[in-house]
Amino acid sequence: MNSTSTLLSIGQFDLKLHHLLIIGILALSFSVSFLLRSSPAEFGWELHEFDPFFNYRATEYIVNNGIDSYFAWNDELSWYPHGRNISDTSQVMLHITAAITYWISGSNNLYDFTILFPVIFGSLTTIIIFALVRVIGGTTAGLLASLFFSVSIPIIVRGQLGWFKSEPLGLFFSILALYLFLSGINSNNKKITITKLIGAGILFVFGLSAWGGDQFFIIPLGVLFITLPFLRKDHKFLIWTIPLFTISTLLTSLLFERLSTTFVFGLGGLSLAVPTIFLVICILIQNKSNEKSKTRNGLLFLLAIIIIASSLLILNDDSAFISLPSYRYLNAINPFFTTTVPLIDSVSEHATTTMSQSFLFHSVLMIFAGIGIWLILKSNGKQDFIKNDMISFCLIFSLFGVYISSAFVRLEVFGSLSVILLSSIAISILIKKFFSYKHEIKTVKNNILKLSFLSGIIILLIIPLALPEISVSGIVDTPPTILNGGTKYQIGTSDWLDAMDWIKNNTSENAVVGAWWDYGYWIQTKGERASLADNSTLIDHVIKKIAKAFISSPDEGWELLREMESDYFLVFVAGERLLVDHNGQPLYLLNGGGDEMKKQWFMRIAEEPLQKYLHLDQTSGTNFFWNETLLGKMIPFSPVVYIHPQTNEQSISYQPGFVPVYTKNIKFSENQNGPLRLVYASPSFDVEKGGHVIGIFIYEINKEYVRIN
């Protein structure tokens, strides 16, 4: 029986052996993806990171109040006392899609459903990526892409259990939209083409509404539109299909507040509209030109468009009609673009991708991706299974994806998609060439040679997955953030859950709990109380005021917290208790990633000189920090000695290369009449020897405190 043998006939469809093979490989990809993404379950069944808690609460609002109420919702728990217009500042399609699928599923636990949501949609995307790459490079390439996608570290990390954020659904919608678009412009059936292109435009906007990062799919599409008049001869077809997709996209975007005219008249919308207009006019110019001059005339027109567009961007300012995107998008377009805004730089997701990280994420696939570029360029459109326009899209998408991913670690998903696309096509071409080559040797040796070739490819692909240092399972096997506070410690504790439970049960319903913006969503969702700032970072001056309060004197900090109408204030300290004590007192190292490690950013955001508060290592606090600042007083530890990690030398004062060792020291106790009173400390504050401290400390603002002038 060969692969084309018919196993079953259903109407006009014949189920063949190779169909079962395709189904089997896709099932394997889905299963592997599902299992890897579910790894954090061993630590606990919780939402992961920070934004998912807000997204859960927004979805819960739709489930309880309906979609109409959601679009009128001003969230009073966010950015107290300002509030937040949710539909204008959120990932609307993420919340609506989750609510609708929750209703359809018949589940009775929304929290559990949202924990599993990214795993399901992320795993389903393994099937969508197969369909997309199959359109570009054939079935073999599509199957390989599905397998590579299922084990891609950047994609799994940003779509694992509890990651109820934008990326999994955004990628699902946008990759599906790309598939519909590419298959639509290659369809011979006009009705199918129209349906696919309109559907692609709608789904593309759904993806944009779910994840703003999907705007980067616009760049390769816009460049592809520019190349199509030179690559394809069916100009009568292109002149209506491409505008149909663009119009569908722009009109659908007007239905969403966050996109609307800001997207249509911004760089995003113009990056689609201008290439579409160029395509139409270029085709008209070429149709009016003779055979020898039509390419030249089209290129001259392209040059004119580039000059005009560049001039508009250079001359554009805040009053111009072009709406420029935020720093994140500008930095992705130009990775050399830098910012002097500490708030932006303080976000870990905005860290620049390093070369070592790229090799860790993609490993041997980077080599195959390079081979893919060489094979595609070498083919020069002569491969009967890859058309010219698909070659163009493949190269454009991949090169822009790698370029964009160099800006932020968060955008490595685009680099991963690029590498997956190129490497899957490369391996499929290599396999096709090798097995189609007529060997002038005996059949047995021929079979051994083919088997050796396949074995070599498989070994090259599997070894990086198996190495403990870079194994996918080792990297994604991390605890949900709320169980370790986002620290470097691979542990799971109930400290944050207990702290939020204390807030919910021991403060009044109208209480306002201040904290650094990292913890705002947890306070709103788990603590069910209003917070001063949260992870949306919408109001810069509020965050700056909190930073200012942290490094002000206790009295001045108290005044600032009172101005912000805060009733409580929370700080987070992470460290570990050493196995030795000092004069009967336990000793601690504080370097886990809590507020004790973020204090340099508080100072930068407050525009204060670091040298006043920090030693030369820009981590260890000076005596002034510990004795004269509100944050120094709120951290219930004090340095007692400095130790050199390599030599074990000790010093009572800071020396370069030495690290501070701390003892407990509560400065604002509950019984004192100071500006703040410590009313709650999480359980690990009393950890036994050798344990980790995930310390959440909640202070009540003493409204009866009389400031000493």
Image (cartoon, helix red, strand yellow):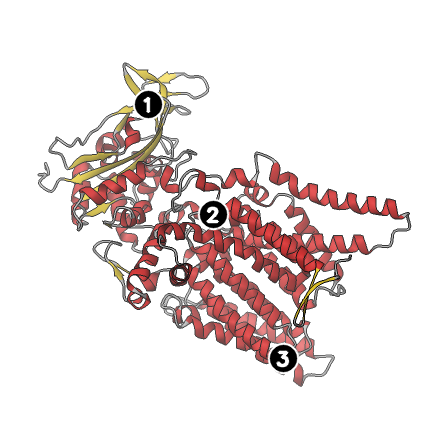
Q: CA distance from mark 1 to mark 2?
A: 32 Å
Residue contact between numbered discs 1 and 2, judged by CB atoms under 8 Å: no
Residue that numbered label 3 is attached to: 237
Amino acid beneath label 1: Glu
Residue contact between numbered discs 3 and 1, judged by CB atoms under 8 Å: no
Residue that numbered label 2 is attached to: 160
Q: Please state, as top left, top right, bottom left or bottom right, where the N terminus lies in the image.
A: bottom right
Q: Is residue 665 among what the camera can see?
A: yes
What numbered label is drawn on residue 545?
A: none
Q: Quadrant of residue 229?
A: bottom right
Where is residue 67? Give x, y as percent.
Answer: 33, 66
Q: CA distance from mark 3 to mark 1?
A: 73 Å
Q: Is residue 605 above or below residue 171?
A: above
**Dot 3 or dot 2, earlier in sequence:** 2
Q: Residue at x 33, y 64 (%)?
A: 88
Q: Is residue 23 above or below residue 547?
A: below
Mark in front: 3 vs 1: 1
Where is residue 635? Give x, y as percent.
Answer: 26, 32
Mark in front: 3 vs 2: 2
Q: Quadrant of residue 484?
A: top left
- How many other residues sit within 10 Å of disc 2, few (<14), some (14-19) or many (≥20)? many
